[in-house]
Amino acid sequence: MDSDSNVKNEKFLLAPLSISLSSLFFVKNVSAQSQILKSRREDHWHQCGERFLAIPIKKRGKILVSSHTLTRGDRTTTMASTLLSKTFLVNRFAHSLSFPSGNTQILTSIFSKKFFHFQANSASVAYNPTRRVSSFMASSVAGARAQFSSKSLSTDDPVVSPDWLHSNLKEPNLKVLDASWYMPDEQRNPIQEYQVAHIPGALFFDIDGVSDRTSKLPHMLPSEEAFAAVVSALGIHNEDGVVVYDGKGLFSAARVWWMFRVFGHDRIWVLDGGLPKWRTLGYDVESSASGDAILKATAASEAIEKIYQGQAVGPITFQTKFQPQLVWDLEKVQENVKGRTHQHIDARSKARFDGAVPEPRKGIRSGHVPGSKCIPFAQMLDSSQSLLPADQLKKRFEQEGISLERPIVTSCGTGVTACILALGLHRLGKHDVPVYDGSWTEWGAHSDTPVDIAS
């Protein structure tokens, strides 16, 4: 829970932890202008021993949510508010609320069509900053860690280790982003997972949200103006170093690494092994979303909406410098099918590449771009989902007949895992590898684009 001096004298309801979150309650506190958030199940409260949950929300329209993971036996439970998943505009929404004491009001959520209940409650206790409810934290690894500076860190290698990040986590010029994203059939919600556990101080970067709103294709690269507005809203400046990670190890984080580089920011690295490796090594995680994180997420969401609606945003603190050589479109790939100037590598599975299985998205033909070769992205990683050493990466490419002396372009299903190939090639010294942004979802949907399948 945040120790902001502005809330030290506020009062908070001690709410028993609910195992299953089915509705959210905003409750008007008996203390002056203070609100608290509490969760209840449909039928009854679940008490977890002597453990309770206290969640402050700042007054004066600024919301500070702190959701804490508690344990009961061998089960980990959490109150993960949906403020980041479906209510990026909650600050503006809650700021307009005013309820007379004693009244209960029910309002349909403008975000999720569920009901939010607002009611008065007189049960409160004074907040004691010396007796906080601890969020679930993995124990820190003992022993001294080497100290480094992100300013002196080379951009030749695109990844950093968890040890390095842990040693530099509090550097003011280092920003950390959780860029978790999952395939639809995985049925995982990255924003909810961020709420449950994330690296301390990390902000959530929404790959689907930070995209071209004029395209029907999934998470296409946004405009320069849109990207600058979002990154500025997240509090990132051009002089900052950025470390990005995801919840699978090394997966969608590579996409955000590529996005920053497309817009001219080279001081970006992927956390090797991601959140799983970070936790395996015993480093702390947070199970709360601070008021700062919520406000920045709200501002980022509003910024990109305004850009695509033609409205002004500001201030812009992150200046982009578009690198067109790092991104290809349909026309460039069509030209390459004829001219073969670049070796085309497809990061999808061999079965999808061969056309032996249907594509996961409806209306997309099976097969591959003529002349392309298949190196599934998983072949870039070891068993801990960390990027392979340079010698092993080189061997993987050579086995598929890829010459590192010639130009290369990468693609995949929707432009995510193609960036893992680009990441591996970057480690081998090839820093100018373009990614076909629309990838197979675009190519396979066109009736006039040539398609090959395995004979």
Image (cartoon, rainbow, N blue to C red):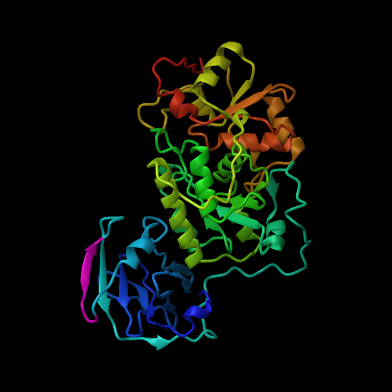
Q: How many marks?
A: 0
Percent position of residue 82, x then y = 38, 61
Residue in the picture at 63% in, 39% down: 264
Residue in the picture at 54% in, 50% down: 316
Q: Is residue 43 left or right of residue 292?
A: left
Residue 146 quadrant: bottom right
* Residue 432 visible from this viewpoint: yes
Percent position of residue 197, x then y = 52, 62
Percent position of residue 315, x then y = 52, 53
* Residue 47 visible from this viewpoint: no
Q: Does the magenta run of residues contain 102?
A: yes
Q: Work out whether 138 lies above or below 449.
A: below
**Extent of the magenta region:** 101-108
Q: Does the magenta run of residues contain 411?
A: no
Percent position of residue 17, x then y = 39, 74
Residue 380 quadrant: top right
Residue in the picture at 42% in, 29% down: 359
Q: Work out whether 154 lies above or below 407.
A: below
Q: Work out whether 31 lies above or below 25.
A: below
Q: Is residue 432 left or right of residue 209?
A: right
Residue in the picture at 39% in, 61% down: 83
